[in-house]
Image: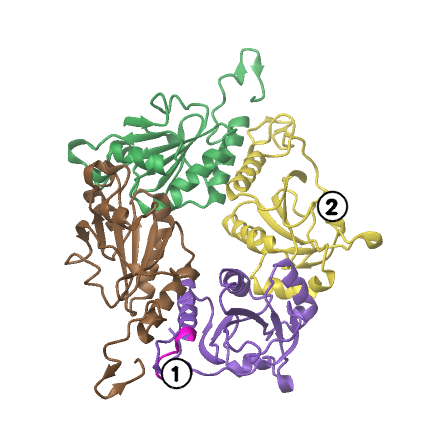
Chain colours: A yellow, B purple, C brown, D green
Amino acid sequence: MLLARPRPAPAWRTTRWFNTDEPLSLERLRGRVVVLYAFQMLCPGCVAHGLPQAKRLAELFAREPVSVVGLHTVFEHHEAMRPEALAAFLHEYRIGFPVGVDEPGEGGDPVPRTMRAYGMQGTPTSVLIDPAGNLRAQTFGATDDLILGAQIGMLLQEARTGADGAAAEPSAAACDEEGCGLPA
Amino acid sequence: MLLARPRPAPAWRTTRWFNTDEPLSLERLRGRVVVLYAFQMLCPGCVAHGLPQAKRLAELFAREPVSVVGLHTVFEHHEAMRPEALAAFLHEYRIGFPVGVDEPGEGGDPVPRTMRAYGMQGTPTSVLIDPAGNLRAQTFGATDDLILGAQIGMLLQEARTGADGAAAEPSAAACDEEGCGLPA
Amino acid sequence: MLLARPRPAPAWRTTRWFNTDEPLSLERLRGRVVVLYAFQMLCPGCVAHGLPQAKRLAELFAREPVSVVGLHTVFEHHEAMRPEALAAFLHEYRIGFPVGVDEPGEGGDPVPRTMRAYGMQGTPTSVLIDPAGNLRAQTFGATDDLILGAQIGMLLQEARTGADGAAAEPSAAACDEEGCGLPA
Amino acid sequence: MLLARPRPAPAWRTTRWFNTDEPLSLERLRGRVVVLYAFQMLCPGCVAHGLPQAKRLAELFAREPVSVVGLHTVFEHHEAMRPEALAAFLHEYRIGFPVGVDEPGEGGDPVPRTMRAYGMQGTPTSVLIDPAGNLRAQTFGATDDLILGAQIGMLLQEARTGADGAAAEPSAAACDEEGCGLPA
């Protein structure tokens, strides 16, 4: 269910943020499981499936080290989906989690930069990033709740105990001069 | 299920139309049952309930003398819901029935003119107009499919056979020099 | 939406009734629009679509001259769907409208008699009967709420004003010694 | 999301099994994550929520070490839900995962024995058992897919790497005379 070969998640390139005092970045979210939802406010699949799932996720996992983050990746109808329109959309749809605006593509590229860097095929796309900043899953279109839940559960558990051989990093705190303790 | 006292439906005041070659009006739709859906493109209830119902209605009643018409009645976030944005919205949501843009309110009134004339309380609002141009039902919020269907069925049947006392017009053809025939 | 050629609805053959003090029959329901739901308690489509629609119908049209009636037409797994099991089912599913048990088929016919008389293809099947006892529509499988609503609305309106040529019965009260009045 | 204090899951007491050649038991499922669904065939919440979730789970996790098992825990309307009726139900609802019939309660207890041993409050109840046979979660009523998915994901990951302090059992194989190896 998770990518066989985790790789560092590309940095986010954003021009503006909503619902957060400070811009978010992968570095600031280190230590948490991050669920990134790329969407467009006029994308029917995003409105019907992606964003409602993101809202429930933010609510249900509020007490877990899980961060739900939206990314407005406009690649069409740019004039209709400017940040001012997005602000109205977020207000009307009662979206309370942080949402960044993806930086416009370079040299006339209609695809914004973060979307391009992740190689997304469209919206909605959900991305799972582990506490170490590695990209662990990326799905274009609707993701079944059971599967998404299982992926998050795996990352949460992994964060507690360390992952298996390939991906696990022995916690620095696990062993010190005094000896080796059980992971916290 | 229908208003006890039908009254002539107020004229539509619009600045622009989509999905139709010529502007629509009550006069042009005389003889048909009209279901008017007032909506805003950034209204969650419109996107989740009103517009999907309107789409199904247009599809299911395509062979009946029923016209489904949208009316974009923007009373908030005006900058985010300009006609250019509406065009993108209609395209993305695959809305194929005619949609008019309600004329801005006068003297700084945020409520557009047709919405004001009908005394609508918000969006979505669905309005039923009979073939003679009378307003027969108006509902703010979601309408149950069974109820809406029944209202339309009543108007369709009424159009065939004449309504009851108050609204009925004896068909000219029902009685002639030869005597009185059963309604066709 | 209604049958081009209405015909008298076949009589109901039943062995038992639930949720009603006296057995129901077409005669007893004369003057009302009747929506008959043929179902089996272990039929997934009946439980998921037919019966919930019937429940909503009974609720929404409680003040109209509409009667919702269930008919348990068991044509398979007879041992698992005996009347005692049906009683438990009706209790658990909170079904409050009258339900008759279709009379077992004759001569080893697994299809019960009323189901056979109506030529039903399976369950769920919904049947619309007008106030004069004529069969006006019969649908196997799920019926769209909008269509069903429209059919019921047509019959309700027809009952008020008389139907078109084929089905209309001139009301006895429409003409008296004084002459002929418009239908009430 | 998982019980703070795992405890050995009580043994299953069953009289009959469907959809499996041999009776299932906790012992036979050791090494797998087990999702046990207690249900009654005439329980609306089971039919609407519990069993459809169980079916999707069985399908989506078919390639994972996850076993979905049904348990027919009849505590009311016993006559209407005998094993013969259950067989018809499982056939009609296309339920393909193994289903056991809970053993009738002793001494006239209407609650069957496994249901009693787990202290279930009603149906549907879902129970999560880890690969070591410990009860890790038990929920009466509908469980959100995201939460259930996360719980299963945690157990799957835990099975790969060992759990955290409180719940972890050092694998017998982890340490031997040669020293201690990383968990497989």
Q: Is residue B166 magenta?
A: yes
Could you tell me which quadrant the N terminus of chain B lies in? Answer: bottom left
Looking at the image, can residue D11 be seen?
no
Looking at the image, can residue B71 be seen?
yes
Q: Quadrant of residue B72?
A: bottom right
Secondary structure of residue under mark 1: loop
Question: Does residue D87 lie above or below B141 as drawn?
Answer: above
Q: Quadrant of residue C1?
A: bottom left
Q: Nearer the viewer, mark 1 or mark 2?
A: 1
Viewer-side residue, B157 vs B178 = B178
Q: In which chain is the residue bearing label 1?
A: B
Q: In which chain is the residue bearing label 2?
A: A
Q: Which residue is mark 2?
A: A11
Viewer-side residue, B140 vs A6 = B140
- Give the label on residue C175, or none: none
Could you tell me which quadrant the C terminus of chain B lies in? Answer: bottom left
Kindly check if marks 1 and 2 are in contact, taking CB atoms under 8 A apart as contact. no
Instruction: Please give the name of the residue rendered at 60% of the width and 27% of the height, measured from the top-left corner.
Output: A164
Could you tell me the amino acid type at mark 2? Answer: Ala
Viewer-side residue, D84 vs A95 = D84
Q: Are marks 1 and 2 on the same chain?
A: no
Using a 10 Å C-alpha cutoff, classify the residue at mark 1 as few (fewer than 14 neighbours), some (14 to 19) or many (20 or more).
Answer: some
Q: Is residue B108 magenta?
A: no
- Give the label on residue B170, or none: 1
The residue stretch that appears in magenta: B159-172
Instruction: Please give the name of the residue rendered at 67% of the width and 62% of the height, measured from the top-left corner.
Output: B88
Q: Residue furthest bottom?
A: C178
Viewer-side residue, A152 vs B93 = B93
Could you tell me the amino acid type at mark 1? Answer: Pro
Q: How many marks?
A: 2
On the image, the x and y values in percent for residue C122 come to 34, 45
